[in-house]
Amino acid sequence: TIIDLYGSITGATYTDNTLSNVENAIVFYLDYSKSEGVYTGGATSKVEITDITISGLSGTADAIYDILVNADVVGHHSDR
């Protein structure tokens, strides 16, 4: 999503997926700068993300990355 614009991601479900040789498994970018043409690393609060389910995800990875979110807009979540 482009910085300073509004949008939403809702109702996405990722269930029982096995990942192999992937660079980025599941990515929601909320920090794209259209003027700079890059991701800034600073999520905006203008994008609503609701009802996302990630369950039964398995596989291997060479690198693990943090999930970048704006704490002011993150609702219920759990790490399983």
Image: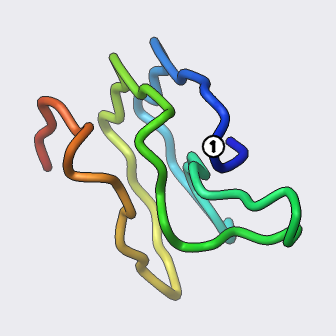
x 35%, y 55%: residue: 69
Quadrant where the N terminus sits is top right
From the viewer's side, name the closer residue of 46 and 51: 46
Horizontal relation, residue 36 to residue 2: left or right? right
Horizontal relation, residue 74 to residue 79: left or right? right
Horizontal relation, residue 17 to residue 56: left or right? right
From the viewer's side, name the closer residue of 66 and 34: 34
Identify whether 65 is placed above or below 16: below
Horizontal relation, residue 38 to residue 39: left or right? right
In the image, residue 7 lies at what x, y percent? 60, 24
Image quadrant in which you'd find residue 31: bottom right
In the image, residue 79 lies at what x, y percent? 14, 49
Image quadrant in which you'd find residue 13: top left
x 46%, y 12%: residue: 11
> Which residue is tagged 1?
4
Q: Amino acid at mark 1?
A: Asp
Image quadrant in which you'd find residue 67: bottom left
